[in-house]
Image (spheres, helix red, strand yellow):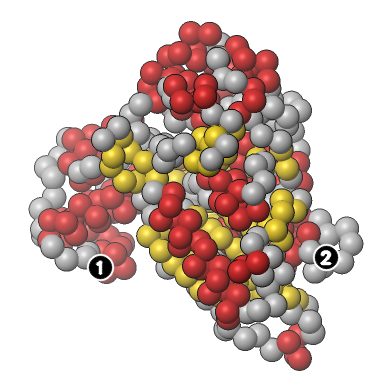
Amino acid sequence: MSSSSTAASSTAASSPAAGVHGAVRAVAAVDLGATSGRVMIGRVGDGVLELEQVARFPNGPVRRPDGWHWDLEALWGHVRAGLAEALRREPSIESVGIDSWAVDYGLLDAEGLVAEPFHYRDERTAAGVDAVHAVVPFEELYRRNGLQFLPFNTLYQYAADPRVADAEVSLLIPDLLAERLTGRRVAERTNASTTGLLAVDTGEWDLALATEVGIPASVLPPLVDPGDTIGRAPADLAELPVVAVGSHDTASAIVAVPLSTPDAAYISCGTWGLVGLELPAPIVSDAARAANFTNEGGVDGRVRFLHNVTGLWLLSETVRAWSETDGAPVDLPLLLAAAADAPLPARLFDADDASLAGPGDMPARIAELLGTPVPGADAAERAVFARVIVESIADAFARAVRTAGTLADRSIDVIHLVGGGALNALLCQATADRSGLPVLAGPVEATALGNVLVQARARGCFGDDTSLEDLRRRVAEAYPPRRFAPRS
């Protein structure tokens, strides 16, 4: 799923000194998360790797009579306006790339979008899980697609959606927006790997699997790879080339993880925490399946071997509930500072408990798991509760790191934590303490940086034969990480 940051973005100067650093080139990155979206200008050159945020807009589920949806038309309007503003500020922009959360899709016919895309947290998918597993048991499914079990994987959503049978094509969220810009209906491979319909051994659509579970193979569009040009935007957006990036936001984020050793683990932390390793080949062992680890596509054919851990969603939903109770926003930095001074909790809760998955009264659900009273308006009580949340997330991160190392037979020696969670010093330190490993935090804007770097490489900004490791060295130089050493 998505690792998108819920934190405010860092921005660079809007006019880098081209005369000092040589030619500086610009691209636009559309980075969409489950709670907000941004349009960024990325500037690259000799010694230059900078981001400028030109638009930020809210995003989130909307309730309709038939369930939870995404308001795609509002999202499209924000993206289009953001790109226009980016071009106004930087007319030399050479291309645009789009990334977003995974699994959710829109169905199209000859006229366009059939209906609003469903939100992955909508409850309708339970019936799809039963329908798929009645035909293809999960053990076989894992061997074929390599994906951990998540009840909202696209495959299960399709099985619960009768409209699929009448659609011409299905496109995931970044591909839907690329289609709005270019008219082309394609699927970017890293995001397609999250649908459950991409063969883990070939990286191509498993058409036989689609047929077995009753999904028309015709709705699966042609695949493109990160770096491919999808098409061009309309004239009012300067006919910008639309370049496929790692359109699953975690795939883009991992591009910008400055992995410091061959045995480094990563955590891409935002709404979700994606905890894992970058591998050259998938692991589809029984042990990996039992541990619910997934094998998703990465840029340059790498494998993102990871486990989804519920991340800052738990904290943001708690803060949202308290803000609604108070009738005023809760000051999150102040809350976290107080939480850092609270005692280490004697008891934690399972951050991945199914009862915490949906929107609603998060403090009450967490309190029920802990067997404690729901905290009231008292600041000290809330600080203690926030500390429990952060430590529980960190504990889940540490367990996932240890499991990843065991499954891949690697001695993990450092954890790189990127995304919005890199701003949360309490979470970074707790992860170091509970894992017994140093945590290198940053960059915060890993997803946007990865989006920019893949575009820039495709546009020839770095010369020939630029590897993923070359791109990561640029990230490490431009955004040195902050180190958190484990404490006994």
Nearer to the camera, 103 or 336: 103
- At 26% from the left and 64% from the top, the residue drawn is 335
Nearer to the camera, 456 or 445: 456
Q: CA distance from mark 1 to mark 2?
A: 44 Å
Mark 1: few, some, or many residues within 10 Å (few <14, many ≥20)? few
Which residue type carries mark 2?
A: Gly
- At 24% from the left and 55% from the top, the residue drawn is 320
Provide residue 299's location: percent of width, then percent of height: 71, 47
SS assignment at label 1: loop
Which residue type carries mark 1?
A: Asp
Does 264 appear above or below 49?
A: above
Let me know if residue 202 appears in the view.
yes
Nearer to the camera, 340 or 123: 123
Please state which of the two labelled residues, at mark 1 or mark 2, is closer to the viewer: 2
Provide residue 28's location: percent of width, then percent of height: 62, 67
- At 56% from the left and 11% from the top, the residue drawn is 136
Q: From the viewer's perspective, tell me whether residue 215 is left or right of residue 186.
A: left
Task: Report the label total.
Answer: 2
Let me know if residue 481 appears in the view.
no
Q: Quadrant of residue 276?
A: top right
Q: Pointer 1: what residue?
A: 331
Q: From the viewer's perspective, tell me whether residue 190 is left or right of residue 340.
A: right
Provide residue 449's location: percent of width, then percent of height: 62, 63
Q: Pointer 2: what residue?
A: 460
Mark 2: few, some, or many residues within 10 Å (few <14, many ≥20)? few
Q: Report the residue that reaches farthest toward the bottom.
A: 19
SS assignment at label 2: loop
- At 68% from the left and 20% from the top, the residue drawn is 207
Does 436 appear above or below 458?
A: above
